[in-house]
Amino acid sequence: MPPKRAASDEDDGPTIPQLPQKKHFRQRAHANPFVDHQLTYPVRPSDKVWSDLEGYPKLFEPGKKVVEFVDVGCGYGGLLTTLSPLFPSKLILGMEIRPLVEQYVAQRIQALRAQNSDKKPDEPDSFQNISVMRMNAMKFLPNFFEKAQLEKLFFLFPDPHFKKKKHKARIITPQLVAEYAYILKPGGVVYTVTDVKELHEWMVKHLDAHPLFERLTQQEMDADPCVDPVMNGTEEAKKVDRNGGTKFIMCYRRLEKSRIVEGEWKGFTPLFGENDAEDAEGGEGDE
């Protein structure tokens, strides 16, 4: 069970929430996105209430200030807390499917807000601009975000799903990339990072194939203030460094118009070839 809130050193002073201890929120590294996780989601983006305590109670303004950065599979929230002071005027959301991990991040954010309550809501390190929800992004992203709403989408160290029949459960597929193009505004950027070379090549292949995305140049990535946090600011990135692993990154810009001339595009390459179709069928298991 998560630890009880620590008492204040002063008997007559207010109780300041302490940062949660990760050891109380350990959970397996990945979850099956195809099972029923009993999640609550809005019918349409306009139905979502972002101004409640779990959202952005001091910053959200309907029609004026909306969520623009989303970290899909945010893990223990390292990217959220790293980006928060860098972009204090942007609302940043983490989506995490594992319940204990989401609870950890929520408590972490509430504690950081309380510990920095002397700061203005839009001031760096107030942490009023970050939030987290338990959600299956593979199924419900369009339920939360309007067309062309987001500026940045992060996919950092996603589940590699090594088995061929599990490839359709990867977070980057032709069908999902089309959804990402829908919710990203022109000029918005997708960031992918992994320590699995084969998964990196898979993500690059499918993002390269979409006519509404183009790679950022190395010069553009070097100048992007988000690149260092995605490569070094998350718990998983630090773990890879400790283990002497290699991290692979690729970033893509959402184009305003298709880069393929109308009539020339022949559609996406199927996830599975004819010989693989039979292997791809069957139960999802719990991997």
Image (cartoon, helix red, strand yellow):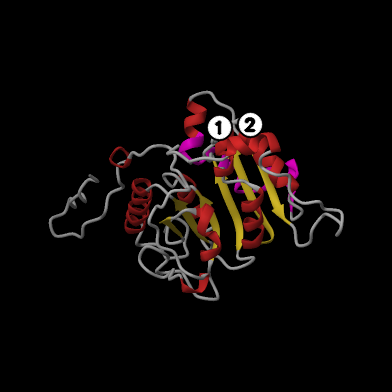
Residue nearest the observer in this picture, 99 or 280: 280
Left or right of residue 213: residue 92: left
Q: Residue at x 37, y 69 (%)?
A: 52
Q: Is residue 245 left or right of residue 118?
A: right
Outermost residue to the bottom: 63
Could you say which quadrant of the image residue 87 lies in? bottom right
Quick one: which residue is furthest to the front in this view?
278
Residue drawn at 32 percent across, 52 percent down: 107
Residue 232's quadrant in the figure? Answer: top right
Q: Give the Cα distance between marks 1 and 2.
A: 9 Å
The residue wearing badge 2 is: 198
Which mark identifies residue 118? none
Q: Amino acid at mark 1?
A: Phe
Question: Is residue 262 one of those drawn in magenta?
Answer: no
Expressed as whole percent of the image width and height from the top left, the position of residue 47 reads 47, 73
Locate residue 175, reporting x and y percent: 64, 52
Q: In which quadrant is the C terminus drawn?
A: top left
> Given contact means CB atoms under 8 Å apart, are the residues at marks 1 and 2 in contact?
yes
Query: Closer to the observer: label 1 or label 2?
Result: 1
Q: Which mark is residue 162?
A: 1
At label 2, the amino acid type is: Glu
**Magenta stretch bounds:** 213-237
User: Is label 1 in a helix, a strand or a loop?
Assistant: loop
Mark 2 Cα within 10 Å, few/some/many (few <14, many 20+)? few
Q: Which quadrant holds the N terminus?
A: top left
Residue 221 belongs to the span the image colors magenta: yes
Q: Is residue 214 left or right of residue 169?
A: right
Q: Nearer the viewer, residue 146 or 176?
A: 176
